[in-house]
Amino acid sequence: MTRNTKATLVGGGIGNLAAAAFMIRDGDMEGSNITILDAQPVMGGSLDAGGTPVLGYSLRGGRMLTSDNYECTWDLFKTIPSLTAHGSTVFDETLPFNDRHRTHAPARLVDRRAAKVGVPSMGFSMQDRVELLKLSSAAESALGSSRITDCLSPAFFETEFWVMWATTFAFQPWHSAVEFRRYLHRFMLEFTRIDTLEGVKRTVYNQYESMVLPLQAWLVSKGVNFLAECNVTELVPRNLIDDFEVVGVKYVRKGVREAIVVGEGDLVFLQNASMTDASTLGSMSAAPEFKSKADSGGWALWEHLADGKPEFGKPSTFNTNIAQSCWESFTVTVKDSEFFDTMMDFTGNAAGTGGLVTFKDSNWLMSVVLARQPHFVHQPNDVQVFWGYGLFPDRVGNFVGKPMSACNGDEILTELYGHLRFDRDPLQTAICIPCRMPYITSMFMPRSAGDRPLPVPLHSKNFAFVSQFVEIPEDVVFTVEYSVRAAQTAVYQLLKITRPVTPITPHDKSLHVRFEALLKAFK
Ligand SMILES: Cc1cc2nc3c(=O)[nH]c(=O)nc-3n(C[C@H](O)[C@H](O)[C@H](O)COP(=O)(O)OP(=O)(O)OC[C@H]3O[C@@H](n4cnc5c(N)ncnc54)[C@H](O)[C@@H]3O)c2cc1C
């Protein structure tokens, strides 16, 4: 690599934003030699958020982070200045915020009578414990492409543990046993406090404003070029017998076909697909439209590249079963404090300290989270915003005779009040914006070794994948951390950076943590 090396990054999610930052910070690259293209109007990918108090705010997701894991993420954000706490980095702003607003969730589960469910134990039978131990100590090669249901008996999915774990991390019984096993190891510390979510850390505002915007501002200050609304349609390979090298990037921007020539020694990074591809927003009066990859074309580039090239993975493992990878979230904007006051009274938590409240008997398996307010930087004082989701959007509700996926925002609120047994009044002025995400858990689909490419595939000369759909040993998908780790891995390898990728903290090897986890499982 020389100081004139150029890099073209396809996709502007946190993965590629991180890749650009690692190239500049650790690879000594010129920011002005880096160009990031994204199909969306804004950078940030799945982490986007927006709206106004009048039209309602919207976020596709609200993230839980930890400071005991997320090693690459914090390594990065220790460098990035905050936009709201002047003189601090994002890391320095976030940790003290969490010390001031510690998570402790006494109302983690709520039952069908709207009563808080105490969780004195995980609810395991001896058979559950034996099966769980067997699964957690199995080799990944032995589990292969099996599902969680292949390893655990039906009664396990009725335990308090399963409801808490599934709703915290978005697992479904039919998901990959290998991924579930990885989570048990990676988040063993969280297993010991899953009933109170005490390990959870949150950003000061939503993750678009607290993570994406500061990172993007830092990249802009270094001269990085951004091209939004740019759909990359083809990566042109050089005809080589053994190696793979990209020599051109073709894209369509505002209806115009253009191309970037990739010179000798230049680099290309691709975000192969997105968990929020083909997602759609509804409104108070309309359910979100049903869309799929056929409408968005979001998986086409990876599918095209992987055709006949097994080292580039197998996208069809992840994107051919919307019924098993879809769920729906919603964002609610309220214009008086009554809902928040009633919720805080009910849960015993100030907003921002409660984690998730899950209605464990709800047909949609519905949860809500009240973040610390304001959740948007310019949110007025008399407006509050909360976020929720249902993991089974295809089921008919308990209080609304329709599947969640067919409901508008008003009907979703009716279902929510029903579970809370609140009068309709507190939310009379609310705006609820639903969001359907057909591929949200696509990365959890059962997979075999090789279905995900390596960040830098074998024989690649100048090309890397940075996404949730690459293979990184031991780490877990459906996290910001996985994308940032993929970025660090790919950048360090292609740029031959000798600084090691930030290691995974081996909590599962700690005798103390293992002992605490066993105690929890046998309580
Ligand atoms: C509802 C929800 C809840 C979540 N909860 C958590 C949580 O609690 N904790 C946590 O750590 N993580 C959580 N996550 C996961 C986390 O947000 C994602 O893992 C992360 O944001 C993915 O980042 P990415 O950069 O890899 O991909 P993305 O954000 O998906 O970005 C990929 C980008 O690439 C672009 N792109 C792809 N192909 C092309 C092309 N051909 N041309 C142009 N552009 C292209 C897409 O438009 C997209 O913007 C959650 C996510 C959601 C949606």
Image (cartoon, rainbow, N blue to C red):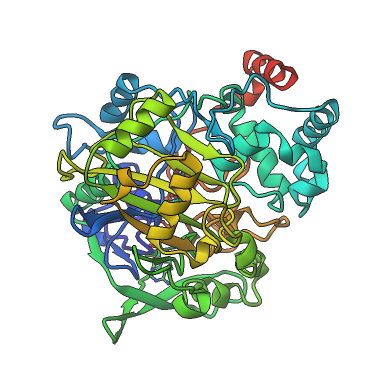
Q: Nearer the viewer, residue 103 or 67?
A: 103
Residue at (66, 77) in percent of width and height: 308
Residue at (51, 74) in percent of width and height: 293
User: Image check: 67 left or right of 94?
Assistant: right
- Image quarter where the N terminus lies is bottom left
Q: Classify 232 as above or below 77.
A: below
- How many numbered badges does the structure rendering display? 0
Residue 474: quadrant of the picture: top right
User: Image check: 115 left or right of 178?
Assistant: left
Q: Is residue 177 visible?
A: yes
Q: Quadrant of ligand 1?
A: bottom left
Counting from the top left corner in percent of width and height, residue 16 is at: 38, 55
Counting from the top left corner in percent of width and height, residue 391 is at: 56, 52
Q: Classify 274 as above or below 63.
A: below
Residue at (67, 37) in percent of width and height: 162
User: Image check: 220 left or right of 464?
Assistant: left
Counting from the top left corner in percent of width and height, residue 136 is at: 75, 34
Q: Classify 51 as above or below 366.
A: below
Residue furthest to the bottom: 256
Q: Nearer the viewer, residue 197 or 78?
A: 197
Q: Nearer the viewer, residue 461 or 196?
A: 196
Q: Classify 497 as above or below 446.
A: above
Residue at (49, 31) in percent of width and height: 69
Q: Is residue 453 visible?
A: no
Residue 210: quadrant of the picture: top left
- Image quarter where the C terminus lies is top right
